Structure formats: structure tokens, C-alpha cells
Amino acid sequence: MRGRLVGVDVGGTYTKICLIDLDGSVLESFQIPTEPKRPPKEFLSRVAAAVRGWDFKGVGLALAGGVETGDGSLLFAPNLKMWVGFPFKPTLEGMLRVPVAVENDANAAVWGGYIVALKKKPRHVIGVTLGTGVGGGLILDGRLHRGATGSAGEVGHQTLSPSGPRCHCGRRGCLEAYVGTYGIQRAARRLMRKPPKPLTPKRVADAAKAGDSGALRVWEEVGTWLGLGLVNLALAYNPETVLLLGGVARAGRLLSDPVRRVFAEQPFREPFASLTLAAPMDRDWGCVGAALLSQQLTQPG
């Protein structure tokens, strides 16, 4: 019992809470409403009540936004604006009497995928979370790289085309605008004769697997844009592995084959010669990764 950890992955609508073993196996999990318009201290009180009765030695809190690593406060948060500046770490530690780690949700997800899914543990990994938005995390020399201000890993907001489609961040031509859910929907409306209803990445993938030519073009286009974004990151960080996480990654080879083709076309071969692409089965990586990050606070020394 003493080796167990709790992960809390806070979304704009729902919060996932999980109890895990040190190997990342999920023992229990459930979700509660986030209610971001209510005070953050009230939210933490509900989290503390929800885990009462569990035996654990650390808690990891994953938040959708920029995180100040000292007190775990949010620096910016599109869906949790009223919680910006609140000291999550000392407040939750006072409630639960265990060490608490607070991290950006994409960083937490990438750390979870790195620790649990990548058995050989490469030292340098780029992780990309593919869903409604596109986030990411950088593992450099076996450690989560946060950068000078804690903002490293915002891979979805690199500019691929200054005149490209509008991104939800307000800029144009971001990677997210091409390969996030709304980018896939935009491509499907343009390339498919009869886009599925409701229009989701899964339904576009199902149509492609059934032979729909327009859906196949959607994934070829989306995968190509993703590949170009990953090329930029590979040239900057020279990783051994690219880790694709999130619901959009469930498209499998529809997405990964165009990415590999883009890698193969690069004239500067050295960064791509042994670069591997991994897309493990989707799970609550943010919840698991947040919990595993708290393990670092519970280890002696």
C-alpha cells in the first residue's frame, strides 16, 4: 500500500483522479466535475474528499496551462482563468499531508508515456499530445525539460505557415491548426464528399479504413503536416524517439505512415537515421504521469 500514488488530471470540464502502483498500473480511477468558475480551494477540498480512504505517499496534479514550479500556481490557463495565481502545491499539501507535484498536463502525459510505455527508456524523447489541441513535452537526457520559464514543449504552436489557418491561440498556421481536432474537421469538410456526422477524427479514420478516398486524403495531409512539425523538432533536439499520445494518435498508420514518409524525404539524414516513432495504446496518460512525477518527491535523497 505504501508505494501507491495519486494522479489528478484537471480539465476544463472534468477532472480525472487515479490511484496507481509505482509501475504505472491504474488500480482505481474516476472523474469529478471541475467547476472552474468556483474557487480553486473548494476544488482541492473536493479532490481531498474524493481520495479519503486511499493509502498513498504522493500526489501529482496536472493542470491545463503554464505552471510555476515553486508553488504550483497557474501562469496562464485558457480554460481555468479564474484559478491563475492560486498556490496549488502548498494548499493541497496542507490538506493531504503528503508531497504534491504540480505540472502542465501535456508534460505530465508525456512523462507518463515515457515511463510506462517506452520500455527501453531512450534518453532523448519528443512527446506530442494530439487531441482538440496539440501539446507536448521534451525528455532531454532522461529528464523532463521545462525551459527557462516552464514553457518548454509548446510544440503545437510552432508556425508552419504564416498565412495558414487561424489557430485557437490567435495566431495563424500553427501545427495545432492543421493536426488538432478542429484542423482535421476543417480538412474533412474540404476533402470529403460526405463528411461523417458527428464529424470526429475517429469517424474520419473509420471512413479512411473503409476506403473513402477523401478521408484517405485527409489523413495523408494531416500526417504530412505533423511530419513537417516533427522534422523541425527533430532538427532542434535530435531525439531518439517521437512519442505520439492522445485520441488523434488512435488513427495509427493513417497518421504515422505520412510522418515516416516525411522523415524519409529529409536530405539531412543524421537526425532521422535511427529516429523511431511510438504511439502506445491510448490511456489516461496525464493522470498516470502526474502521479509518477510525485514519486520524485517521495524518494530519499
Image (tube, grey):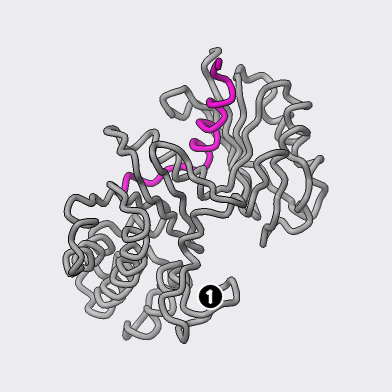
Q: State whether the magenta stretch is mostly helix, strand or loop.
A: helix
Q: Dot 1: few (<14), some (14–19), or many (≥20) neighbours within 10 Å?
A: many
* Quarter of the figure that contains the C terminus: top right
Q: Amino acid at mark 1?
A: Cys
Q: Is residue 240 magenta?
A: no
Residue 85 point in image, percent of width and height: 78, 50
Residue under numbered circle 1: 167
Label 1 sits on a secondary structure element that is: loop
Q: Quadrant of residue 70?
A: top right
Left/right placement of residue 249 relative to residue 220 reads: right
The residue drawn where x is 46% and y is 86% is 163
The residue drawn where x is 45% and y is 67% is 180
Of 140 and 33, the residue lying toward us: 140
> How many numbered badges does the structure rendering display?
1
Q: Quadrant of residue 204?
A: bottom left
Residue 4 point in image, percent of width and height: 53, 20
The residue drawn where x is 46% and y is 42% is 285
Q: Which residues are magenta?
A: 279-301
Q: Is residue 153 above or below residue 203?
A: above
Q: Is residue 283 magenta?
A: yes
Residue 50 point in image, percent of width and height: 69, 31
* Quarter of the figure that contains the N terminus: top right
Most extreme residue toward the top is 2
Residue 228 point in image, percent of width and height: 32, 69
Of 6 and 164, the residue lying toward us: 164
Q: Is residue 9 above or below residue 273?
A: above
Q: Is residue 200 above or below residue 9?
A: below
The residue drawn where x is 39% and y is 66% is 201
